[in-house]
């Protein structure tokens, strides 16, 4: 039997996870990556960035990290791991290959690729779009007077070395992970740092009462309290319907706990607490638990409290030759401005226009059934658009779900039913999650519910730590817990699969 060929567009984490799983399922995947190295956003980001997860939560499920623990690996350590994983699993990765277009060709696809200035057309049976949520163009709005500014204006991806800010006056705009990291690092390097943001957002503490944050949000004891568009069990559905008032009280209480934690651990005096309150939100924590939620950068809050980072709750209005003007009338003289405003919503310039029209019509990202596939073109998978706190297992399980679909083992519901599911989830997210350009294509802190539903679809147990019930409830989930999912699917007797209903 001829192995079906699959073109994977993008050599980020999701693309590599898909290639790994599809290869196990008998497909012939080829990764096309336009950059000179794999890693997606890790190939583009600044050197000082660290992983927000722990190392055991961020790897191919059957390719663990080597060389001991790296609690929050650096950019270079992550790059090294994925370079090694590609070699270890002998994945076909073609670097410096940009996909220009994909055109339907009978029952398959004709993919046009540019490499070293030469165009080449290659036939494939299937497509995986793995361009990622965060590798898109950085949001870079124009500002009045910017042409007259004598300093530098950068997006965070242009920062090659934070030491370039040594002794300089720096304005950082935004309140996501990158903005907090850049403001913190620039201050550590002796710069005069002003942090400008329209709205302060919740940040997850690294530790609360001595416990690493993953003990609170990466096990079932923590995730069962998470409201979601789909609850995988009757117990969870009962909790979030009949006892929803208690759930709301839990999250309001947790918001107060986190706020008090930062005020008491980062500030020592009334003046320091007053400064710190400028970066602590007044709204509830829950709506901010989205893709852009950041882990506390070590030292950021104490530096704000001590006045080493000056926060400005305002918008950047315009530039002059020597600095920036804010919406509250403040003028800041500065040498450099870093616009850390996140990535724009995903765009798919290589796909046919009729597909782009469907995929790009919403400001908050692409709408997909199960965050994996669109009802109108099920021969195309979308990898990494189910991004969450356990991202690599989500990509791997999503790849297995798509493999079962493409092999005819999983039967999709009628298109109308899938569109209804997509519309319901879109409405739920818009009501419960703060806007971001990737709001619709992320599962974020709902990772456990999402993974459980996909595994139920595959008729594989979602309870990966049983038969130890204590570990199942209280143990932190990691990538290794999903190491046998593919083998469990491939070695069981053939059966017909249908997605479980979650939209009633």
Image: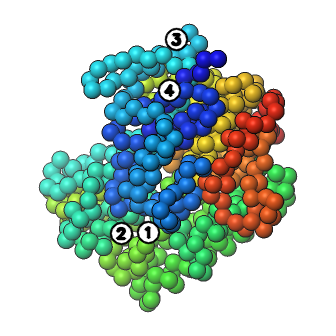
Q: Earlier in the sequence, mark 1 or mark 4?
A: 4
Describe the element under mark 1 as helix, strand or loop: loop
Q: Earlier in the sequence, mark 1 or mark 2?
A: 2
Residue at the extreme top: 106
Image quadrant in which the N terminus is located: top right
Residue under label 4: 7
**In which image quadrant can residue 287 be found?**
bottom right
Closer to the chain start, of discs 1 and 3, is 3
* Labels 1 & 2 near each other (Cβ < 8 A): yes
Q: Residue at x 77, y 44 (%)?
A: 460
Look at the numbered disc 2 and give the secondary structure of its residue: helix
Which tag, 3 or 4, sits closer to the chain's start? 4
Quarter containing the C terminus = top right
Residue at image mark 2: 184
Q: Which residue is mark 3?
A: 105
Q: Which mark is residue 89?
A: none
Is disc 4 placed on a helix, strand or loop?
strand
Instruction: Write down the residue under mark 1.
Output: 297
> Is 464 placed above or below 356 here?
below
How crowded pointer 2 is (Cα within 10 Å; few <14, some 14-19, many 20+) is rated as many
Q: Which one is closest to the eye, mark 2 or mark 3?
A: 3
Nearer to us of marks 3 and 4 is: 4
| Mark 2 or mark 4, earlier in chain | 4
Residue at the spot 58% in from the left edge and 33% down from the top edge: 23
- The Cα atoms of the two marked residues, 3 and 4, are separated by 14 Å
Q: CA distance from mark 1 to mark 2?
A: 7 Å
| In the image, residue 477 above or below residue 184 | above
Q: Earlier in the sequence, mark 2 or mark 3?
A: 3
């Amino acid at each position: 039997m001829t192995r079906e060929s699959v073109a994977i567009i993008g050599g980020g984490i999701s693309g590599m996870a898909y290639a790994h799983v599809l290869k196990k399922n008998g497909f012939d995947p080829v990764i096309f990556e336009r950059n000179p190295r794999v890693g997606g956003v890790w190939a583009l980001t600044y050197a000082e960035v660290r992983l927000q997860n722990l190392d055991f939560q961020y790897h191919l499920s059957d390719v663990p990290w080597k060389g001991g623990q790296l609690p929050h690996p650096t950019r270079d350590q992550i790059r090294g791991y994925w370079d090694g994983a590609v070699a270890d699993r002998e994945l076909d990765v073609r670097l410096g290959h940009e996909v220009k277009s994909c055109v339907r060709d009978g029952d398959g696809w004709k993919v046009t690729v540019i490499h070293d200035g030469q165009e080449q057309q290659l036939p494939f049976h299937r497509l995986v779009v793995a361009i990622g949520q965060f590798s898109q163009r950085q949001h870079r709005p124009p500002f009045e007077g910017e042409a007259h500014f004598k300093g530098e204006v950068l997006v965070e991806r242009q920062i090659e070395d934070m030491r370039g800010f040594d002794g300089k006056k720096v304005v950082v705009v935004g309140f996501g992970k990158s903005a907090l990291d850049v403001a913190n690092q620039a201050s550590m390097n002796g710069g005069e740092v002003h942090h400008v943001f329209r709205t302060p957002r919740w940040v997850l503490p690294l530790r609360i009462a001595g416990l690493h944050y993953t003990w609170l949000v990466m096990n079932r004891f923590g995730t069962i309290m998470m409201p979601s568009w789909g609850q995988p069990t009757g117990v969870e559905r009962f909790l979030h319907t009949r006892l929803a008032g208690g759930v709301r009280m839990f999250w309001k209480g947790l918001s107060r706990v986190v706020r008090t934690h930062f005020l008491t651990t980062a500030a020592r005096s009334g003046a320091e607490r007053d400064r710190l309150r400028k970066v602590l939100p007044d709204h509830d924590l829950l709506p901010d638990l989205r893709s852009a939620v950041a882990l506390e950068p070590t030292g950021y809050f104490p530096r704000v409290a001590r006045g080493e980072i000056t926060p400005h709750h305002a918008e950047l209005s315009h530039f002059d030759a020597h600095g920036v003007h804010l919406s509250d009338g403040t003028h800041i003289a500065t040498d450099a401005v870093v616009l850390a405003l996140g990535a724009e919503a995903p765009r798919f310039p290589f796909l046919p226009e009729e597909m782009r029209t469907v995929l790009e019509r919403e400001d908050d990202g692409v709408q997909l059934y199960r965050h994996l596939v669109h009802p109108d073109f099920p021969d195309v998978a979308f990898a990494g658009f189910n991004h969450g706190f356990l991202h690599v297992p989500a990509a791997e399980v999503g790849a297995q779900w798509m493999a079962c679909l493409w092999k005819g083992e999983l039967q999709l519901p009628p298109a109308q039913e899938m569109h209804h599911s997509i519309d319901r989830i879109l409405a739920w997210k818009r009501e419960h999650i703060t806007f971001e350009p990737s709001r619709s294509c992320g599962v974020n802190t709902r990772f456990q519910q999402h993974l459980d539903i996909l595994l139920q679809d595959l008729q594989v147990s979602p309870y990966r730590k049983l038969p130890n019930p204590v570990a199942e409830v209280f143990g932190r989930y990691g990538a290794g817990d999903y190491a046998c999912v593919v083998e469990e699917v491939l070695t069981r007797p053939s059966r017909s699969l249908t997605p479980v209903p979650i939209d009633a």
